[in-house]
Image (cartoon, rainbow, N blue to C red):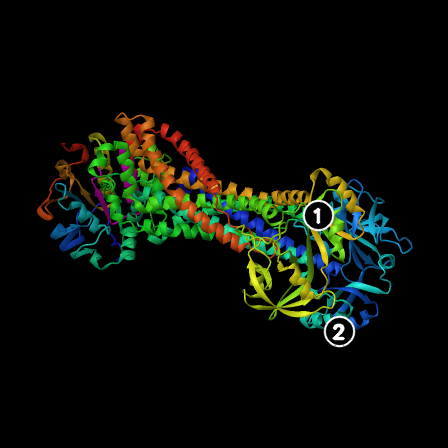
Amino acid sequence: MVPSALNRKLLRDLVAMRGQALAIACVIAAGIAMFVAYLSNFGSLENTRQAYYERQRFADVFATVTRAPARLRDRIAAIPGVSVVETRVVADVVLDVPGLDEPATGRLLSVPAAGRPRLNDLHMRSGRWVSADRADEVIASEAFVEAHGFALGTRIYAVINGRRRALTIVGVALSPEYVYSIRPGELVPDPKRFAILWMEHDSLASVFDMEGAFNEVSLGLARDASADAVIADLDRLLEPYGGRGAIRRAQQFSNWSVENELTQLRTFGFFVPLIFLLVAAFVLNIALTRALALQRPQLAALKALGYSNRELAWHYIKWALVIAGAGAVLGIALGIWLGSAMLRLYNLYFKFPLLAFDLSAGVMLAAVGIALASAAIGAFSAVIRAVRVSPAEAMRPEIPIRYRHSAIETAWVRRRLSTTTRMILRNLERQPVRALTTIVGIAFAAAILQVGFSLLDAMDRLMTNQFSVAERQDMTITFVEPLSPAARFAVSRLPGVLRVESERIVPVRLRAGHRVRTLGITGLPPDPDLKRPMNRDLRVMRPSREGLVLSAILARVLAVAPGDVVTVEVLVGSQPTREVRVAGVVDDIFGISAYMELDQLHSFLREDALLSGASLIIDPARERELTRALKQQPALSGIAAKHVVLENFRKTMAENMGLMLTFNVAFAGVIAFGVVYNAARVSLSERSRELASLRVLGFTRAEISIILLGELAILTLMALPVGAVIGHVLTALLVRASESEIYRFPMSLTPRMVALSALTVVVASIVSGLLVRRRLDRLDLVGVLKLRE
Amino acid sequence: MPSEPDRPAGTPVGPPVFETVGLTKIYTMGEVEVAALRAVDLRFEAGALIVLLGPSGSGKSTLLNILGGLDVATSGTVLYNGVDLTAADDAALTAYRRRHVGFVFQFYNLIPSLTARENVALVTEIVDHPMRPEEALALVDLGHRLDHFPAQLSGGEQQRVAIARAIAKRPSALLCDEPTGALDLATGVVVLEALARANRELGTTTIVITHNASIASMADMVVRLADGQIASVEHNVTKLSARELIW
């Protein structure tokens, strides 16, 4: 079919302004790429997780006890709604890993020698299952084995009940319980120093004096079972044996972490593309308004020829749709690439058997639909305004535009302004709406850059502050069992230990009405010097004598405020349940926490001054000596050195958020360039006649460039403060939207980041100015003057 | 809108195509009201070549715009083949322009991104029973420049493309606002020849605005306007051809 004359006009108009069309398409592509990358990964992660959980029979309810007899299992199985019960023995031990100076943590989990666990089955990667007659065999987690480059048959050493025992790796596996695994007390995965080890049940039980007993139970529920009812029954059964409160799947750490990531993907996948597409619609509106202003005589002629408003409106809307279509195609391609890169990162710390990028048709269709819709929205008002032109205008010569003296031109000022400056000012003032739209467009580019830079900066400051203000210790040690105060002196006598601050952490369940969270209450000295609760604004809080200090997000989750009362169910010892007042909240960054003064906590538990761990300041010169000594300590279950934690966190964050934010910044650069380039091109085509006339009168290229680019420079400068404000608001919105129980970004507004975004916009402006300047240099003087467009 | 009455080509004079009664147009410019037309009564015969003469501001463009459905009168009536245009709404006026009138503008108003043939096709695609674009362009002697863009054509050629575009729909009326205003003498003659030929061969009522009095000699009827009113109406007994005009 031969395209109609009008469609051919459309095509040629687009080709003629390909630079601008491309710039707009790129802005749309940036938004669509984000949308596709985030939402595809949301889908990939969600589907992979679901299939994996199903295949490996991931449990619905998890509970920990001190020591329960094996016979209890039948009574648990009899709880209405329970379909499968699996019990096991679990213990954390210190590992001595070949090639690693400092001690690592190993989590030993028992598995049956014959057959597979009924719940939370392993996904074997290589090697074989443990055999019943070999007590030293373990199956190790893939992340740990890969981090060290171990082969099957490698021996590692565990300190179990004070004795160093060799363990041989006979198999490598993944587990649905440890898709995301973190060493207790750390912030990011450190597969080198945290191993999950599966051991034959009887061997493990005999070592830990757990023969005929278990300390962990997982349940699979019937489809219609009420998890709350089952948990209540289970807790009642386990209570006499030191039950610490069952949790449901949603609260299981690994699953909860994946869930948080999914929520964040969805938030970002909605929020970030929304901003980009709004800006794209906006830029399109400006570009089209101006392009249509140039086409006024053509529009009037077409109307005089008998084309209806509807036909013409559709003609120009199509113009926007073609650009959006190109942007969508480009964006989907870019999104696939970005999404795959993101997924490679996920594979570094989410351990699934296979996590592959999966672009669903739904996401793709939605992307195209959103791109077209935003373009149509952007184009609509511009087109409607333009087609309202009276057809009689085609019969009239162009009316000179009405100019006036600009507002700031008092007689005194006017004498001091050059003619070119006056031209610039009057041109700006003649069309205030247009000047304003350009300012807002450029401001949005600056704002998006600022969001990206601010989050990068926030991340960095989050790190620095966490470790220089909130956690000033060089090392944290955790005891297997709470120890008497004497342990403090034992620790202080270890080589290189300069200072010791003791800590008591008690696992509890906090309850406020129907809202529940399981966590540890941390008991701290009245005026802690090393480990201190810190607000996002860096204010340090003291633990209270009067009650609990809760993380702000925890208070929000429990819907309590200072003065309210929460129920504390202690999950160890005699398991007392008490009401405690909330004394304050701390708007902290990581996780959910509850703090209490150490003495208060002891009296609350009616216990002696026990310690569950300590924070240390050490002599860096003797660190190696100290870690060697600690490796031999049977009473320790965990050792975390600050520099290792910090390094790990930096690496993970740099890999993960670094990639996303780099893309944000790159895309914001595209927007800045797109807006400024469009503004410059439109001004050029509008004023080429005027500028050519000036050239004929003897103005130099540089002089006419100043008229055109000076206007752009003024608009850019005016846009910068507006951008800083919008950027601040958007950052605040994003910080809020991305808050999770795992971590919260601190709000960051630093002059450096504002300056950096402003500078990037200025550079984008200069580059587009130079591109337009090249066209200005090639201005066809005779041609321009002859042609009445 | 009425359908175009069947009329053999070449009939010089017939029933009125346009008839205006008390046609008045007042423009409000700020606080000042300017009367562009004051109670104009006119009859234009079908198939005639009419020239509107008058100085700038005499109201001739306003009259042409109202006849062509580009503008609406403040008061009075305009009848096109007996139908009142003053009662028509925007959609009806669009349809009227689409089916019945062809326009030729002083500045050609071609779409710069379309070739000569495509500029004509712009019209032929939206009307029933048009000429082929090639046919219309051949009528104005541009059969050899079909695929040139406006920028590749001289001013006279561009204006002839505009005429071809206007006549391709076989309009009842061809309205031309200063069609030679932007052209030199020799080129103007070629354009006028093209207009006269279209009038002669297609029988299209043709109204030409000009302030060049010598063009009046090629018209059937000459209307002089001054200050929004009719100053005189003349009927030429013998018409000159465009080449015979004395400038």
Q: Which quadrant holds residue B76?
A: bottom left
**Secondary structure under the numbered disc 1 in the rendered image:** strand
Circle 2 is placed at which residue position? A79
Bounds of the magenta span? B155-179
The three-letter amino acid code for the residue at tag 1 is: Ala
**Which of the two residues, B36 or A170, is positioned nearer the viewer here?**
A170
Instruction: Give A126 or A645, whichever is nearer the viewer.
Output: A645
* Mark 1 vs 2, N-terminal side: 2
Q: Assign the C terminus of chain A to one quadrant of the image.
A: top left
Q: Are marks 1 and 2 on the same chain?
A: yes
Q: Nearer the viewer, residue A699 or A296?
A: A699
Task: List x then y, in percent, for residue B2.
Answer: 26, 58
Residue A245 as seen in the image, left or right of residue B158 = right
Which of discs 1 and 2 lies nearer the camera? The answer is 1
Q: Position of residue A302 (x, y in %)?
A: 32, 46
Side of A401 where A173 appears, left or right: right
Name which residue lies at 51% across and 50% down.
A747
Q: In the rendered view, does A750 fall on the left or right side of A413? A: right
Please name the residue that numbered disc 1 is placed on. Answer: A640
Taking the spot 45% from the left edge, 47% from the top edge, the residue there is: A727
| Residue type at numbered disc 2 | Ile
Callout 1: residue from which chain? A
Looking at the image, which is closer to me, A653 or B155? Answer: A653
Q: Is residue A419 above or below residue B80?
A: above
